[in-house]
Image (cartoon, grey):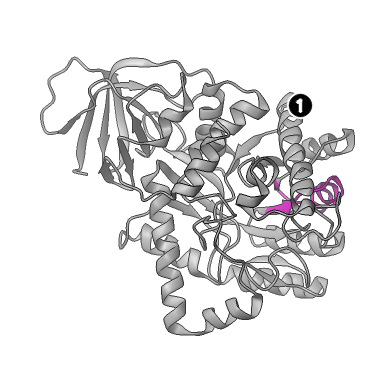
Amino acid sequence: MSKKTAFINCTILDGTKDMIPQENMTVLVEDKKIIDIKKSNDTLSGYDVIDLDGRYLLPGLINLHVHLPGSGKPSDKAQSPEKVQKLMKNPISRFVVRKMCTNYAKTQLLSGTTTIRTVGGLGNIDSTIRNKINSGEILGPRMLVSDMAISVPGGHMAGVLAYEATSEEECKALIRKVAENKPDLIKLMVTGGVLDATVKGEPGVLRMPYEYVKACCDEAHKLGYPVAAHVESPEGVKVALKAGVDTIEHGAVMDEEILSLFKEKGASNICTISPGLPLAKLDPKLTGSTELTKFNGNIVLDGIISSAKAALENDIPVGLGTDSACPFITQYDMWRELYYFSKFVGVSNSFAIHTATLKNAEIIGLDKEIGSIEIGKYADMLIVDKNPIDDLKALRTPYMVVANGNVIKEPKIKKIAVIEDALDSQL
């Protein structure tokens, strides 16, 4: 993008809670930031003019729950900790993995997601990619990263996307180890998940004891990092919040104690309907789900939806993320999370857009920089042909994406047909 760019003849959806379409507008951008917003009736000189011909311009989407090491293909097999560690020790295979993750980050951007928050990756690959994007060396979204998470032996993603802590002191030491690469947040795996549950009716079993969670939170906060936690049971939510976690990822059914803890701690709930829906709703023959997985998947899905509803009813901040790389969760389908949020939680389409833009920016502390179409903010923008307030499916095929000083016209993404067909059956 040239230093001065004018996006003319657009209909603005600004990302605010009460947004209404603003027709026939011009957005002036200079040095990556919005410097003016006005009616499209002036002659512009000195600007590179892009005529959007009435299309809808809104803030770029923000995905608060991303794992980069995977496409979401249902044929992808979970790798053993031993195999993952072997891959990461070999310079050649590590380079290949980093290249794969770099491409998936770019896919997020091309789909209209201009900011991602990674919550569990391989080694320091995520922070390396972030640094290359920030330096302008490669094209990608704005990234907030956690690098490796902290888990316990037998815990969620232990030895794969998470280190294993066996004591409070080791928890603190591992936080300091992750902090060496200057991440943006710390991720904890407090409970198990659907795919590693062993008992019917007991997904999200507490794996990390309170003392470990608190030790991690205390050390992370001392170093200036917020803490996100994978949690899929009420017990886990209580432990995480009491210990000082800042965001509950996924969530579970809330009772009065949980609601009180959220408010007391000022924590946010990150809603991720996308990973639960395939396990709970799709044909087990397609997903490879067992009776155990499907039963537990329904419990977790219901808990995620229920917790989002309860949080909204009680003025607890709710954000959105996809949990990309899980089975049937691609790196390009953030629009589906908005659609599910509207369909299952019962919010309006405009509120879903607001949540995935300005509210998500508020939760990660970047609302002064991104999240809305506003003078002084970065020009992270998504342009689509039709009004997503009328139909959120308008977001699935961007006409243009603007981010990090780059204008990407008619971005192309190679989509996975089996996933598209299966998930479209749930629309």
209 relative position to 49: left or right:
right
Q: What element carries label 1?
A: loop
Of residues 250 and 329, which is closer to you in this image? 329
Answer whether residue 141 is visible to the viewer in this image: no
Looking at the rendered image, the quarter that the N terminus falls into is top left
Q: Residue 270 appears in which quarter of the rendering?
A: top right
The answer to whether residue 127 of the structure is visible from this angle is yes
* Vertical placement of residue 270 versus 45, above or below: below
Q: Residue 70 location in percent, x, y?
A: 51, 61
Q: Where is residue 221 in the image (x, y as percent from the top left)?
A: 69, 57
| Quadrant housing the C terminus | top right
| Image: 351 above or below 169 | above
Residue 99 relative to residue 227: left or right: left
193 or 288: nearer the viewer:
288
Drawn side of residue 21 relative to residue 206, left or right:
left
**Is 292 part of what is drawn in magenta?**
no
Q: Where is residue 402 in the image (x, y as percent from the top left)?
A: 32, 41
Rate crowding at label 1 as few (under 14), some (14 to 19) or many (20 or more) other CA atoms within 10 Å.
few
Q: Which residue does the numbered mark 1 point to in the structure image?
A: 314
Whether 234 is among the magenta residues is yes
- Rendered image quadrant of residue 347: top right
Extent of the magenta region: 228-249
Q: Which of 382 and 182 is in front in this view?
A: 382
- Amino acid on which the number 1 mark rests in the picture: Asn
* In this picture, residue 191 sits left or right of residue 342: right
Residue at image x 74%, y 58%? 217
- Name the residue: 42% across, 76% down: 95
Query: Residue sitting at 48 percent across and 27 percent down?
Result: 392
Report x, y in % for residue 73. 52, 56
